[in-house]
């Protein structure tokens, strides 16, 4: 089961990567992440994901923010549910329309 890290810890880790990149002898972001992650006791993939999310949320990267992505996921789920409901209603209305067209006994 994944570990839930406090938001302050995530922010500090991202700040450490940012500080490392601001030095004159700055390595690539990948090298900085691979250097810092073991010191914090987390995987480099986790730290890279936090850095990417922070870049999106601060507008340093052109893409959707995590809030916008969550809204898009919610709307997609809602859209799928509405499509299923619409199909059920179409099937039901076709059934009842066929019942009305049958001659009475």
Image: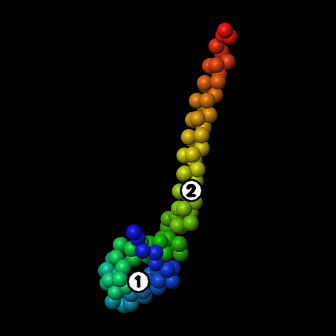
Determine whether 74 is above or below 12 in the image: above
| Residue 48 image position (x, y, % from top left) | 39, 74
Determine whether 56 is above or below 105 in the image: below
Q: Which mark is residue 59?
A: none
Residue at disc 1, secondary structure: helix
Front-lying residue, 76 or 55: 76
Front-lying residue, 46 or 91: 91
Residue at (43% x, 83% y) in the render = 13
| Residue 5 image position (x, y, % from top left) | 46, 78
Asked if the residue under mark 1 is in contact with the one under mark 2, i.e. CB atoms within 8 Å, the reply is: no
Residue at (52% x, 67% y) in the render = 66
| Residue 23 image position (x, y, % from top left) | 38, 90
Rendering quarter of residue 74? bottom right
> Which residue is outermost to the bottom?
24
Identify the image quadrant of the N terminus: bottom left
Residue 10 vs residue 26: left or right?
right
Colouring chosen for the image of the structure: rainbow
Q: Which mark is residue 17?
A: 1
The answer to whether residue 24 is visible is yes
Disc 2 marks which residue? 74
């Amino acid at each position: 089961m994944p570990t839930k890290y406090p938001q302050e810890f995530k922010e500090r880790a991202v700040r450490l990567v940012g500080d490392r990149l601001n030095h004159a002898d700055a390595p690539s972001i990948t090298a900085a992440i691979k250097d810092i992650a073991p010191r914090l006791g987390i995987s480099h993939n986790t730290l890279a994901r936090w850095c990417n999310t922070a870049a999106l949320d601060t507008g340093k990267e052109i893409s959707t923010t995590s809030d916008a992505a969550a809204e898009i996921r919610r709307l997609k789920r809602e859209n799928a549910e509405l499509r299923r409901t619409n199909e059920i209603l179409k099937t039901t209305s076709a059934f009842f329309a066929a019942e009305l067209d049958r001659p009475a006994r």
